Amino acid sequence: MSSVAPLVEGLAPSDGGSLSVAELKTALRRLAVEDTADCLSREDLEAKLRAARRPPELLALSIQQLREQLSAVHVTDVSDCLTKEDLVSRLVLARAAARHTTSTSTSFPTKRHATGLGYATDGFRQRYLDREIAAKRLPAEALRHPKVMSLEASLDPSDTLYFWQLFSVMGTGRIKTLVQQFYVRIFADRETWFQRAFADIAPLDHHVATQSAMWCDVLGGGRHYHGGEYRLSFHHQHNAMRVMTQAGAERWSMHMLDTLCAPSADLTSDLRVKGALLEFLRLAMDKYAIEFRFDSKYLLLDTTVGVKSKLEAAAPSSTAPSHKETPSAS
């Protein structure tokens, strides 16, 4: 815990009971929780800190998975963690420490994972480049530029990271963990019509396996998603129609943004990763918006405020809305 202690001094072992309001807000900021406007009392801040230290997507992992993720952030001594909740808290704090170290240093990830064209990589890449060239955000020569077409991410942090280079930075493990955290949120959704649309197709583990395979395939990890875009289109047309609507797209996007912005999200120390993931997701969402006739203009922006406040202000319902709802992307 020594590597984490400087960041969370005054935080452990309690969840905030001995901290002042200012210290609670500082602790929350260190766990990447910036918005405390809804906290009207010290008790509210303590509750938010407890939730940030024990996010549901990490509580859903097994003890072995938690140990593996702790090992990935160089925390091997967990002898003082007597419960699963202790392991979750340790992982959250370790990741917060890693983010703090990254933000105050010039460190940059140099490890690269082996890459390869997937069944769907080229189609997604070409569609993105065609769009960017048509909008004059990239020159036509980009189609022949090694840094653009390569599946390997540039080691220069000032260079653009394209989504088909993400596997070289993230690898299978991080991608699968991120997808699992996303589906934990989906399966815990309080809107029954939305949650059941996924649960009726398959159990959580199946969604995680197929979505992870699709992401690894598109993001440059080689052939993981047999059938490529034809399979993806068939899935959305025949299995996921119940959520291929405006309401479904908004709720899917809310959960994905919450996943990517959560303290538990392991996006490496490469600050380009989240933006590249969002480019990939927006490209797919825009395509589905045309196919299924919903509006994607305000979806998957790098903030949860607009969509989330709109959705959470609505009264809970247990039936699917009659207007157009989107993707499962598994």
Image (cartoon, rainbow, N blue to C red):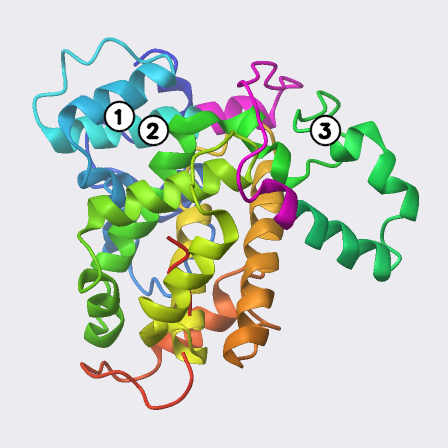
**For the residues bearing labels 2 and 1, Cβ distance under 8 angstroms:** yes
Answer with the quarter of the image where residue 95 lies. Answer: top left
Q: Is residue 48 left or right of residue 288?
A: left
Residue tagged 3: 150
Q: Amino acid at mark 3?
A: Ser
Mark nearer the N terminus (3 vs 1): 1
Mark in front: 3 vs 2: 3
Query: Label 3: how many residues lie within 10 Å, few (<14), some (14-19) or many (20+)?
Result: some
Nearer the observer, 114 or 239: 239
In the rendered image of this protein, does residue 267 appear above or below residue 102?
below
- Chief secondary structure of the magenta span? loop
Q: Amino acid at mark 1?
A: Arg
The disc label shown at residue 93, or none: 2
Q: Amino acid at mark 2?
A: Leu
- Under circle 1, the secondary element is helix
Whole-percent x, y for residue 329 in the image: 42, 56
Q: Quadrant of the N terminus?
A: top left
- Under circle 3, the secondary element is loop
- The answer for how far apart the CA atoms under marks 3 and 2 are is 35 Å
In the rendered image of this protein, does residue 233 appear above or below residue 23?
below
The verdict on residue 101 being magenta is yes
